[in-house]
Image (cartoon, rainbow, N blue to C red):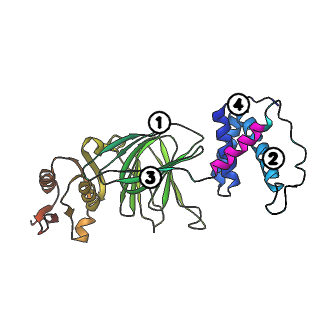
Amino acid sequence: MTIEFSEQVLREASDWFARLSGGDAGLEDRARLRSWLAARPENRQAYDFVTESCGIAAAVLERAPVPGRGDSHEPIGRWVAVGSGLALAAMLIAAIGIVALTPATTDRYATAIGEIRNLTLADGSTLTLNGATTLDVTFTHGRRDLDLKSGEVFVTVGREPFRPFRVHAGGRTIEDIGTAFDVDMNGQNVDVAVGEGTVLISEPAASSATSSRVILSKGQALAYAPDRTLGTPRTVASQQVGTWRVGILSYDQVPLEWLVADLNRQFDGGIAVPDPELAAMPITLTLKLHDRDTTVGTLEKLLPVHAVASGTGALELVRAKP
């Protein structure tokens, strides 16, 4: 048997085998595997090689000596011919598949209030973390996962068609289909906006019998909560998605409390809206960030609100008097 594939293709094949053997592969994973196998002849050859090699490894493990019963064991049986010097290679590739089943390494990134951090990941994807943001990044040979714990992140995804990039936030999964997008998490409420390309937002497969999903394209956004069914996308200006990275906040018919949450990522001291009705008031505006007091002063000119200092040093937004 002649080996005609690269080490990278071999590792990709091993990861596909491990994922499907692990029992957690869904219909989308199987469809991706079919596409990967059809993309290049060497992909199919590498996958068949890994499948055959892991079968050999399993046979060896089943017939290995049992402690306490001496050194005797049953014959392994006939080896599959893989060419000169490749019997050992087959076992090593089986080991790659076994290693792929082990938990992947996760890296955590966090920013302080007022800090904006730019990251370039190993696959070429770039992240911009807003202030007071925490997220975990986990990469394997077959998947790229970002778990947003709190805050906001703008993602520009490195193109790898056979290794999906998924953001997990607020009980849903946001899967890149070649794009740049923003994910804003306020408590467990999440707002997703797409600046380029397309994303798929879906519920966990086990969360309901009829899991909902929504596709967002360039210039679309969707806000959701973990205890509600996904709603209808809204239209946004694509050029305004992620403008917080350059100190500009843009909003189109979103609750005032979202703006306040964004400001609290930028400024120490805190800003609050005690009145629930005022907090839910929809706003449409573009705001240039300065220091806290100057920025709040601009809000007082643009919105029917007035800032009042509390005893703790925080500012409270109340309804402005006529």
User: Earlier along the polypeptide chain: callout 2 or callout 3?
Assistant: 2
User: Residue 56, which numbered label?
Assistant: 2
Residue 113 percent coordinates (x, y):
26, 53
Q: Classify residue 12 as left or right of residue 279.
A: right
Question: What residue is rendered at 68% in x and 35% in y?
Answer: 39
Q: Give yes or no for contact between labels 1 and 2 (Cβ–Cβ under 8 Å).
A: no
Residue that carries the numbered disc 4 in the rendered image: 5
Whole-number angstrom distance, CA of label 3 to CA of label 1 = 17 Å
Indicate the quadrant where residue 142 lies: top right
Q: Which residue is mark 1?
A: 124
Front residue of 45/36: it is: 45
Name the residue type under label 3: Asp
Q: CA distance from mark 4 to mark 3?
A: 33 Å
Is residue 27 left or right of 60 when viewed as pictured? left
Residue 93, magenta (yes or no): yes
- Element type at marker 4? loop
Q: Main secondary structure of the magenta part?
A: helix
Instruction: Estimate how packed mark 3 is, as few (under 14), some (14 to 19) or many (20 or more) residues with alpha carbons within 10 Å.
Output: some
Give the camera-side residue of 50 and 211.
50
Total tally of numbered discs in the picture: 4
Q: Compared with residue 251, is residue 89 higher up or lower down, i.e. above or below?
A: above
Magenta stretch? 88-101
How packed mark 2 is, by other alpha carbons closer than 10 Å (few <14, some 14-19, many 20 or more), is many
Looking at the rendered structure, the kind of residue marked 2 is Ile
Q: Tell me the residue that label 3 is attached to.
A: 136
Whether residue 283 appears in magenta in the rendering, the answer is no
Residue at 11 percent of width and 65 percent of height: 308
How far apart, in angstroms, are the residues tagged by discs 1 and 4? 24 Å
Q: Residues within 10 Å of mark 4 (few under 14, many from 20)?
A: some
